[in-house]
Image (cartoon, grey):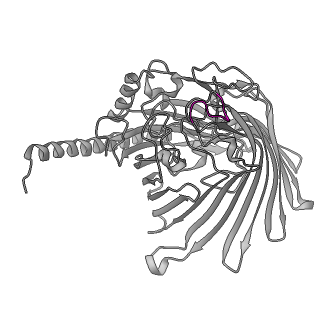
Amino acid sequence: MVINEKRVKKMRQKSGGVYRSILGVAISLALAQWNVAASAEETSSSGSDENGNSFHLGGYVRGWSSFNMKDQPETAADDKWKPSMLRGSLLLDMDARTGPLKWKAVARADREYKTDYLKDLEQLRSTNGTGTGGQSSNIMDNYNKADLRELWTEFNLGERVSFRIGKQQIVWGESDFFHAMDVVHGYDMSWRLFFEGENEEWRKPLWLLATKVQVPEASGQIHAFVRPGIDQCKDIGNTYDIRGGRWFFQPYRGYDLTAVTDNDCRHPDGDMRDVTGGIKWSGEAGPVNYSLAYIRTFAADPVANSVFKPYEKTPTGAFFDLIHPVIDVFGVSVSGYAPAIDAVLSAEVAFTKDQPYNIGTGGFGTPSVPGNFPGVGLGGIMKKDTLTTMIRADKNIDFQGLLGTNRPSFSSIQLFDTMILNYQDSDDLARLFAYGSKQKEHSTILTAFTVLNFNSDTINPSFAIGTDLTNGGGFFIPAVDFVLGDKWRLKVEADIFWTQKDSKKLFDTDAPGTQLMGYFANNDQLVVRLTRQF
C-alpha cells in the first residue's frame, strides 16, 4: 500500500480544524449562556403580594450547532462535517397576575454565525444571479430574527366563561409529526425543517380573540376563536427556506427563489386582512374523549400563482407569487384507553374543502395545460377536497429488565394519510412547484418513536422513524437528552434520510418521482443543542 503523506497531512489538518471549531463554538456558547443566564437570573423576580398580584420572569439561553453528515451536491467544496448552523437564542417568558387578569408575554431573539458552508451557499447565489435579485443579498437575513412570540391577557366571566385576547397559540388536534386538525397556525421552518423539538418553538402565533365555555351538564366545553386580520404577512402559513439556505430542498440550495417570485398576502383568495376563526366542541362519552371542530384558515403550504396562468390576480413576481388561499376544515377526533392492549388509541379525521394544488408536471405545451412552464407546477391552481386521517397508538413498554431503564418507556406509532377526493390523473396536480412530480391520490406516512429513561430520567435516549408508504423513502432520528442539574439541558440528535428518487438539477423534469423524502436527499445532519434555563 502506498500512502500519500501530503493527503494524510491535509486530512489531519482538516479534521483538526473541524474539531477545534466544534470545541471553540461549544466553549463560546457555554460561556455566553452562563453569563447571560446568570445576569437574567439576577434581574428576574417572582412572587405574589397580599392581593394575589404576582410576577415571574424566566426563559432560557440556547445554543445550536449542526453539521453536514454528507457532501452537498450543489456546492463545489466537500461539505461533509462542515458546520451548517451555529445559532444562539434568548427567550424571555413573563407571567403576571393583576387582580382578575392573567398576563403572558414571550419574546425571542435569534442570531447566527455565518459558517463557511453558508458563505459557500451565499456565493452560489451570487454566481447564479439570484443573490442580488432576491429579497436580500445577505443569506443571514433568513436566520437572524427577533420576535414577540406571545402577548395576551386572560380573564374569567363568571364561573364558566374565560376570554384570552392577544397574540397567542391555539393547539387543536392529536398528531405530532404531521397535522390534520392542528392547522390554526403556520410553522416557521426557514432555519430548520426536520429537527426534533417542541412545536411551540416552530409554531407562528397569531393575534386572536379566544374563549372557552365550560358545559359540565354535557361533560364538555366549547372553544372558539376569531382572528381579526391584523397579523403581518410573515405570520401567514408555513415559511420555508426558499432563499437558497441550508434547508432549501435539493437541488435548490444556493438558489434564491425570491429572485423570481413574490409573497402575495393580499391575494383575493387569501388576504391576510380576512377575518378567520374556528369553533370546537370537546367532550367525554363514557371512557372516550372526542371533539368536533370547524376551522376557517389559510392553507398552510403556499401554492404558486403563475404568470403563465394567473389565478384571480396577475402576479408581480417574474415567474409566480406564493399565496395561501383560505380553506375550510371540518374535523373529528376520538381517543380512549384500550385495556386489552394497555394502550391509548386515538383517531383524527379532517375534511378540507378546496385545498389548493398547483398544476403541471409534464413539459411546455402539455395538452391539458397549455403554456405550462416545463414540469414545475406553474400551469395554474386547482382546488380539491381532501380527507386527512390519523390513527395513533400510545403505550408504555417495560424495558426495565431488558435495558435497565428506570421506568416504562413511552412509545407511539402513528399512521397519517391524505386522500384527494374526486382524484383524476388527468388533473396533473403537482406535488410541489419547482419539481416535475405528480401528486398521487393517497399520501401515506407511517411514523413511530420511543423514549427511554435512565439514571432517574437524567439520560433519555429516543428513537423516531418514519417512512413514506406511497412514494418510498423515510427518516430516522436517534437522539439523547441529558438533564444536567436543575438548569442545564443538552441534546444530541442525528437526522438521517433515505430516498427513493431525488432531483439533481434545477426545475428537473427527468426525475418525476421526486417526492417528500427526496427533497431531503444528502441533507443528513448532526445537531447539538445546549440550553441554560432560568
Does residue 296 appear left or right of residue 79 in this picture?
Answer: right
Pick the quarter of the image with the N terminus. bottom left
Quadrant in which residue 468 is drawn: bottom right
> Which one is in front, 174 or 316?
316
- Which residues are drawn in magenta? 363-370
- Tally the numbered discs: 0
User: Residue 512: image x %, image y %?
Assistant: 53, 44
| Above/below status of 70 relative to 220 | above
The answer to whether residue 177 of the structure is visible from this angle is yes
- Residue at image location 58% in from the left, 31% down from the top: 147
- Residue at image location 60% in from the left, 48% down from the top: 199
- Residue at image location 65% in from the left, 58% down from the top: 416
User: Residue 334: image x %, image y %?
Assistant: 77, 62
| Above/below status of 399 relative to 368 | below
Residue found at the very far front of the displayed protein: 367
The answer to whether residue 99 of the structure is visible from this angle is no
Magenta stretch encompasses residue 86: no
- Residue at image location 30% in from the left, 44% down from the top: 22
User: Residue 522: image x %, image y %?
Assistant: 40, 47
User: Residue 390: image x %, image y %?
Assistant: 69, 59
| Above/below status of 141 relative to 277 | above
> Which one is in front, 386 or 493?
386
> Which one is in front, 431 or 236?
431
